Image: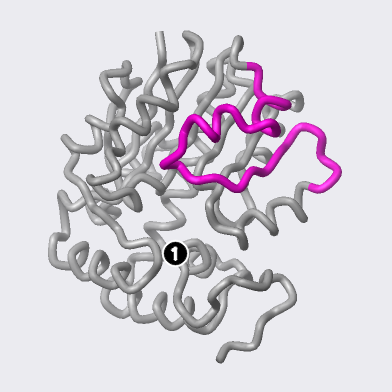
Amino acid sequence: MTQRPEWAPSGVDLDRPNAGRVYDYYLGGSHNVAADREMAREAIELWPELPLIMNANRAFLRRAVRYCVAQGMRQFLDIGSGIPTVGNVHEVAQAAAPEARVVYVDINPVAVMHSRAILEGDPQTGVVQADLREPDAILGHPEVRALIDFDQPLAVLLVALLHFVPDGDDPIGLVGRLTAPLRPGSHLVISHASRDSQSQRTAEHQALYSRTSTPMTMRTRAQIEALFGGLELVEPGVVFLPQWRPESSGDVESHPERFTGLAGVAAIR
């Protein structure tokens, strides 16, 4: 049995890999255990580009947050925020707009505990443990309501989250319930694992995640576009991670499809 590190709360299973902790390992974090590292190393053996893909996803998140700030967003609801690492939403948003407010939401108690420890004493951020499958509970949570003014535009972030929601849980409907009360000018940010390319590797990766408590459902570009529910996609639409508004042309290599993840941002008019 794995020895419980000080940062891991009681009741959290450390002998089974957890997607949030595996992701932390890919990003070079320290909040992971042997089961997570073993799964990550196995995945990297099958797919050596995985850490690169995960870092590309994080880079997209940063660009999307900066874009939303430039569009006037001063409120962010990051659902499925994961274990905090360098470059979190509040750091990026507040660097551009010091008054920005951020609420992190995650179902994982490890992620929630560490988020609260990191953000303790910051009155402009909050952390909520909740399930995306209960969007009304998220929107009505007292801590969300304390920081988010729903009469003002809000950016909702669903980054690397919806591929953990199976079709049977109606991800399109869940996203619709999250965005229905938002004011015009609000934005929706999504990144999602896709099976449009590298089919053998994505299938292997999906099979690997079936061993965790959060199996993956990889989707096509058309299925990912449908998650936006008819909202107005901003240019360049739903594209591979490095292609979404790169900071320079040199940031997009000749084969961006090898990153597999697709991403997009939509505006609510």
The residue that label 1 is drawn on is 19
Please say whether residue 32 is one of the residues in the magenta stretch.
no
Q: Which residues make up the magenta segment?
A: 120-149
Which amino acid type is marked by label 1?
A: Ala
Q: Give the quadrant of the C terminus.
A: top left
Q: Position of residue 148 (x, y in %)?
A: 65, 23
Q: Is residue 254 visible?
A: no
8 left or right of 67 in image: right
For residue 152, which quarter of the picture? top right
Q: Residue at x 50, y 35 (%)?
A: 63
49 left or right of 185 in image: left
Please say whether residue 125 is one of the residues in the magenta stretch.
yes
Instruction: Pick the residue in front: 2 or 92.
Output: 2
Q: Secondary structure at mark 1?
A: helix
Residue 118 against residue 223 in the figure, above or below:
below
Judge the density around disc 1: few (<14), some (14-19), many (≥20) Cα neighbours within 10 Å: many
Q: Give the quadrant of the N terminus.
A: bottom right
For residue 98, which quarter of the picture? top right
* Residue placed furthest toward the right: 121
Q: Residue at x 53, y 52 (%)?
A: 107
24 left or right of 75 in image: left
Instruction: Pick the residue in front: 35 or 131.
Output: 131
Q: Residue at x 51, y 41 (%)?
A: 79
223 left or right of 227 in image: left
Q: Position of residue 268 (x, y in %)?
A: 41, 14
